[in-house]
């Protein structure tokens, strides 16, 4: 019978106050990352309940698919300690034996993109140390291969993990921006990617450059896309939020961006403050009007991102972005690595939007429709229930069949096991087996559903209070 071979988690945002996997202090506002979140503890109990029932001797591989440690909206020490609490739970209580294989793969997201930057810089320095005098120096890498990627240790995570004696043989590999697993006959593959590039704001430098030089060729590879945009992604989503008192202000702005009225007030106040020194009333009015328009196109656009669109799992902007990502960047990477041949069966797993879903999508120049899975997120982004928001765990077996544990959705107190198939497909053996292993009415599954709903409710109240505050 098929075993769980890969476990995919994304958008944990460990250390962020709005993550239900980060423990809150007694006052329910500040985080206490010295203790594991009750939801985190219960979620790992659920995973442990099914993983220990694998029949083979090989442990599953953990795929951390981006936005794992929060670097944009909290300090590095809090995010690091929250990650340590997460890893402490991933052991067997009786033996201290790790639940997963000793090689973990990490794909950076926008909120922890700086981890990739740090790792690739160290990787480059280590490479330089191997060169002989006068030997040519190659450029630093900006991406890794889908299959058999270069060995790039994820330095921060490895240091944090190896502080724990239970993980002396465990190592995290950094792979970016996409990673794949491929069947021996090369006809079936699963691709993992955090997915921030489905939103156009993350490729803003590409858009600006194309407007300035409209005749130039747009990026065609993942490497070119990352080269043009890495500094922008890293600056705003992985660096600025940790910059002392400025970082605290950025955190407050992020929270206020969840309230449309607060966004209008921020834009008005910012434009007013930046133009106040103009002596001419007419000049001041003109400058303010122009600046407000610019701020609406930048800050306002960021506020209207994918997570703040409650009616659809993907907006038209993100649908178009996903189409470009798959038809251009992922496809070109597959062709480059597989001698011009695409696998017949492709599945794509991403996160980022915090709205989990599964869908069969038709992309041009693929042999068959692609099964697309979104793993959602574990943070509360709004002040009111959003039925499409929630968090999933994606499971893949050794035959690359994929199923989803829908752990929670806002307003729904139930864990469900889901499978993506068309009307003519039968349930795969993997789904049938795991479905028999889980009793959703018993612990830890029933307890998780109630606990996660309670913690989501607390975050609604906290976010509403913070959004209305002045500092």
Image (cartoon, helix red, strand yellow):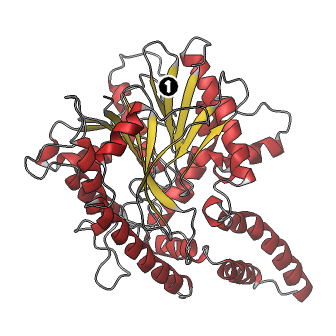
Nearer to us in this view, 389 or 198: 389
> In the rendered image, which quarter is residue 148 located in?
top left
- Single out the residue that lies furthest toward the left: 95
Residue bearing the label numbered 1:
189
**Whole-percent x and y of residue 417?**
42, 49
**Whole-percent x and y of residue 296?**
76, 69
- Single out the residue that lies furthest toward the right: 282
Tell me: residue 88, above or below residue 311.
above
| Element class at badge 1 | strand
Q: Count residues near mark 1 (Cα–Cα under 10 Å), then give few for <14, some for 14-19, many for 20+.
A: many
Residue 250 in the figure: left or right of residue 405 = right
Nearer to us in this view, 147 or 8: 8
Residue 261 in the figure: left or right of residue 240 = right
The answer to whether one can see residue 141 in this image is no
Number of marks drawn: 1
> In the rendered image, which quarter is residue 134 located in?
top left
Residue 309 in the figure: left or right of residue 391 = right
**Whole-percent x and y of residue 339?**
58, 11
**Whole-percent x and y of residue 313?**
63, 55
Nearer to us in this view, 381 or 363: 363
Q: Quadrant of the N terminus?
A: top left
Tell me: residue 46, above or below residue 21.
above
Nearer to us in this view, 160 or 118: 160
> In the rendered image, which quarter is residue 167 located in?
top left
Tell me: residue 170, above or below residue 470.
above
The answer to whether one can see residue 3 in this image is yes
Residue positioned 25% across, 61% down in the render: 443
Residue positioned 54% across, 62% down in the render: 389
């Amino acid at each position: 019978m098929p075993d769980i071979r890969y476990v995919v988690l994304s958008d944990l945002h460990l250390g962020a106050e709005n993550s239900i996997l980060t423990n809150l202090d007694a006052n329910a506002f500040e985080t206490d990352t010295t203790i594991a979140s009750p939801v985190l503890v219960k979620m790992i109990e659920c995973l442990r309940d099914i993983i220990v029932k694998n029949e083979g001797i090989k442990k599953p591989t953990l795929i951390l698919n981006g936005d794992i440690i929060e670097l944009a909206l909290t300090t590095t020490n809090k995010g690091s300690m929250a990650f340590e609490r997460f890893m402490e739970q991933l052991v067997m209580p009786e033996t201290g034996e790790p639940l997963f294989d000793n090689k973990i793969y990490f794909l950076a997201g926008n909120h922890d993109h700086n981890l990739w930057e740090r790792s690739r810089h160290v990787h480059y320095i280590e490479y330089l140390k191997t060169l002989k005098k006068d030997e040519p120096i190659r450029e630093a890498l900006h991406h890794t291969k889908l299959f058999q990627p270069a060995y790039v240790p994820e330095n921060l995570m490895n240091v944090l993990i190896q502080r724990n004696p239970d993980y002396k043989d465990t190592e995290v590999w950094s792979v970016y921006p996409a990673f794949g697993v491929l069947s021996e006959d090369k006809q079936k593959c699963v691709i993992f990617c955090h997915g921030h590039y489905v939103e156009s704001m993350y490729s803003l430098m590409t858009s600006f450059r194309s407007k300035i030089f409209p005749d130039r060729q747009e990026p065609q590879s993942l490497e070119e896309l990352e080269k043009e945009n890495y500094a922008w992604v890293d600056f705003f989503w992985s660096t600025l939020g940790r910059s002392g008192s400025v970082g605290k202000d950025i955190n407050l702005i992020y929270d206020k961006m969840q309230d449309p009225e607060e966004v209008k007030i921020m834009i008005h106040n910012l434009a007013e403050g930046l133009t106040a020194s103009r002596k001419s009333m007419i000049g001041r009015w003109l400058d303010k009007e122009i600046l407000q328009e610019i701020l609406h196109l930048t800050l306002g656009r960021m506020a209207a991102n994918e997570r703040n669109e409650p009616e659809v799992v993907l907006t038209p902007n993100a649908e178009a972005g996903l189409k470009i990502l798959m038809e251009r960047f992922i496809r070109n990477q597959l062709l480059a690595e597989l001698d011009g041949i695409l696998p017949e069966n492709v599945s794509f797993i991403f996160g980022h939007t915090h709205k989990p879903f599964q869908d069969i999508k038709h992309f041009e120049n693929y042999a068959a429709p692609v099964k697309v899975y979104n793993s959602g997120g574990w943070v509360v982004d709004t002040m009111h229930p959003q039925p499409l928001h929630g968090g999933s765990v994606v499971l893949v077996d050794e035959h690359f069949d994929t199923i989803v544990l829908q752990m929670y959705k806002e307003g729904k107190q139930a864990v469900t096991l889901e499978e993506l198939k068309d009307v003519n497909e039968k349930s795969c053996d993997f789904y049938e087996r795991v479905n028999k292993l889980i009793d959703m009415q018993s612990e830890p599954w029933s307890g998780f559903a109630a606990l996660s709903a309670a913690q989501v409710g607390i975050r609604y109240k906290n976010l509403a209070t913070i959004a209305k505050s002045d500092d």
